[in-house]
Image: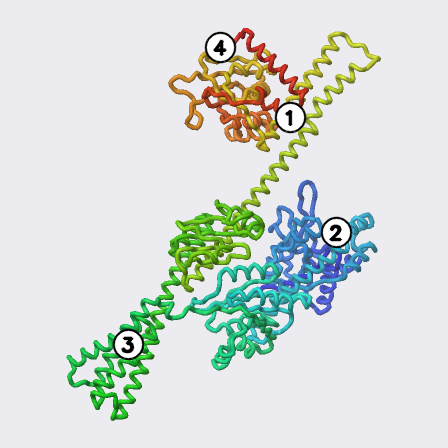
Amino acid sequence: MERGTLRIFLGAAPGVGKTYEMLEEAHRLLRRGEDVVVAFALHHGRSETRALLAGLDVIPPRLLPYRGTEFEEMDLDAVLARAPGIALVDEYAHSNIPGSRHPKRWQDVDALLDAGIDVLSTVNIQHLASLGDVVSAITDVHQSETVPDDVVRRADQIHLVDISPELLRQRLGDGKIYAAEKIDAALSNYFRLGNLTALRELALLWLADRVDEGLSKYRAENGIDVSWPARERIVVGLTGGPEGDVLIRRGARILNRVNGGDLLAVHVRAADGVASESPQALESQRHLIKDLGGSYHIVTGEDPAGALLNFARSVNATQIVVGISRQKRIAALLGNLLGGGVGTRVVRDSGDIDVHMVSHPLGGRGTRPSRQRDLGRVRVAVGFVLAIVLPTLLQFLLLALNPEQNIATAMLVQLSGSVAVALVGGLWPAILAALWSSLLVNYFSTPPVGNLTISDPQNFLALLVFVGVSAAVAVVVDLSARRSKEAARARAEATTLGDLTRGAARSEDTVQALLEQALGVFQVRGAALFSLAGSHSDDSGAGSGGDCGAGSGVGQWRLQASAGELSPPSPEDRGDAAEGDNVEEIDAATRLVLSGRILPASDRRLLGAFGVHLAAQLERQQLVASRREMLRLAEGNTMRTSILRAVSHDLRTPLAGIKLAVGGLRLDDVEYSKDEEQELLATIEECSDRLDALVGNLLDMSRITSDAVNPLLRPVRWYEVIPEAVRAVPEGRVRVDLPANMPEIDADPGMLERVIANIAENAAKYAPESDIVLVGAAGGLSPATLDGRPAGELRIIDHGRGVPAEKVVEMFRPFQRLDDAPQTTGIGLGLAVAKGFTDAMGGSLTAEATPGGGLTMVIRLPLSTGVPFESHRGQTPLAQHASPVQQAALGQQAALARRRHAMPRTSGPDAG
């Protein structure tokens, strides 16, 4: 069965008339005698649309229940059973109610098409999947129902239903789209003039691309090579040289003179893979064309001009931009005699495509290395020596083995000598060998023998053929040898580039590793990466290194990273550098410098590839640094949000209690008993203590997150800080079991007191039925350790419900409460502050499950070395940042703590 055809009516916004035109088309088809049914159509309460449904065969919708409500859906089975010639299906992107055969209506349409039924359907531009985010950004309305672009593009016909935004707003104001109560809201939101204009442009551009695809398909099917200038499309030819930037910008300026169009940059790579293009120049030009809104392409071909023209015709280009260097007259004359350069051949064969030839002083593909330098001076010198010596030796051999001096034998033997010379020294030594061999053959083998006179014209012709064949064989052998060497070099370059690519894909390459790899690849003794001060590379932190040159202002080269035994000079000091430095420009502000030997021209391409990878690595490091900064800012925002939440609720709760109690005491018309007054005063004191603890934790957390915690360490014994630390825990719930011989630890007494207090109060809060036990380790045979050093250990044990293992890490994060406990129990900073202070003192705070149920918090701090850390007049860090009044209060608390330490204790070790 032949598949049906799909025709879609595309609109820029609701109300443009898609369903109306679809129904009008149905009436037209009906008048032609077609079998047309309305499978599903919505009139949305619009009288004009409802009137068009009259006279059409409408298949009743199917009612499906969903969440207590019945919804109308297309009855797919009824439509298939009816088997009409044409079916009308409204809202192509609609999501079906659960219980339907397919989740999407476009899948129902596919079922109708498979059954051989032609379908007319409607869709709005905002429902295309590729444009969903764009439409949401324009209208601030998220589109939940979308259809893949590829599904819509497969339609046989797409008809754009287009009206101006002003007319659409007028229709909306006349009540032809929405009910009267929705008009004002719609005009002020989705149907704003700017929104409708942007949606209309999106629809036109999307459809223009669809039309362009259809045009390309038609031209390909009919073999049409002539460009049809339906759309301005400019192709810029790139050779891989530095002139590419000039050509791309010229093409962009030409395109800016017209409204709309495409800019395409194409680099034609030689089919033999041997070219002198600069990888970093091509990479820079690729970024430039992307920044200008164009696209970058690479094609391969033996003939650059032919490949460029073929690409231009394949994309239906209207203009081509190519460069032409300002050559010397002799070079230009030779080029014309040989058929012209690339630009000349493009102009000659372009046909109806306009060609812009842009002159520039820069070279194109560059000059390939000379043959002598390519083979090496030593090898060429050996070749010239062999060109003189080898034919002479072969002639002596002929005199000994061939006394008759047969001219044919002499020519074959000397020809083999020319081939050998070509294999060793290349073309020119082989030409010399051929000429010298011809003289020897003439003198020793051509009658009359013993002089250079030739009596027989046939012998003269034979000698000329000998010289020509020798030269031709030498050229072929030379070319074969060079291609073999170039292939070997290409394999080595491909292997190196493959290693670079794999390292980049695995994110293993670093700037330092790339520089060390360059040492081995290029056989140099030093490699360094420099960047201009103030540039993005300088800020990326590519590696360790110091300043280069005096001063640090913009314009000074800075060393980012280096490798090897030699320290390459900076680019600005290169004038005084020793011979053997190679400078590769990665970008305007970054240079790669290699020292130890001058690189041959054949290695420049691979050096450029290293430069491109280094630039990519620097960019990656910059992105990683930016990501870290964004994460830091996000964490800061989260912290600020949490603090604001704490301030807005948790701090207001004790303040409300204080205000309520104070307000009650100030009432003149109410008399309170002594007990009632004491209860109100106790409430004030309790809320004040709670408020003080909350503010203290907030300030401490702020100091921890800003790295402003500077503990003043000194020898401390656990029992010096425990009594004051557990003062806020209800009496009778704490049991202290400290061995009498517990050694001193290095700690800040104020911080350690806060750590123990937060842990003990947290245990009392979440284990209300359990005693809290503080157990110390005396040392003995198995003392606690901290990073390999002996440490003192205090365990705070409760027998509550404990904490699941997967939540132990979260427990130490700020603003965390167990099982999202209500905010009246605190703001979730106690353990975070405790861990932050412990880490600041060089210790550790961990959590373990208590055997039998509960949680054990383990505090480990380094054992004291006996040398106190000098403090500011004995003040704790809390006192250093306090006001004079607060310092006085802290002093009173310290004195009270000392008096309490001197009192007899009912639990714990002797003061001894």
Q: Callout 2: helix, strand or loop? A: loop
CA distance for labels 1 and 3 = 97 Å
Marked residue nearer the N-terminal end (3 or 2): 2
CA distance for labels 1 and 4 = 38 Å
Which-is-in-front pick, marks 1 and 3?
A: 3
Measured from the top left, where is residue 384 in percent x and y?
30, 73
Badge 1: residue crowd in 10 Å (few <14, some 14–19, many ≥20): few
Measured from the top left, where is residue 481 in percent x and y?
33, 70
Badge 2: residue crowd in 10 Å (few <14, some 14–19, many ≥20): some
Marked residue nearer the N-terminal end (3 or 4): 3
Residue 418 is marked as 3
Q: Is residue 517 above or below residue 910?
A: below
Q: How is the image coloured?
A: rainbow
Q: Amino acid at mark 4?
A: Pro
Residue 822 is marked as 1
Q: Nearer the viewer, residue 291 or 454?
A: 454
Q: Residue at x 55, y 31 (%)?
A: 810
Q: Callout 4: helix, strand or loop? A: loop
Left or right for 345, reference 489: right
Where does the N terminus fall, quadrant-wise?
bottom right
Which-is-in-front pick, marks 3 and 2?
A: 3
Q: Nearer the viewer, residue 579 or 766?
A: 579
Badge 4: residue crowd in 10 Å (few <14, some 14–19, many ≥20): some
Measured from the top left, where is residue 50 in percent x and y?
77, 57
The residue identified by callout 4 is: 909
Residue 190 is marked as 2
Q: Amino acid at mark 1?
A: Pro
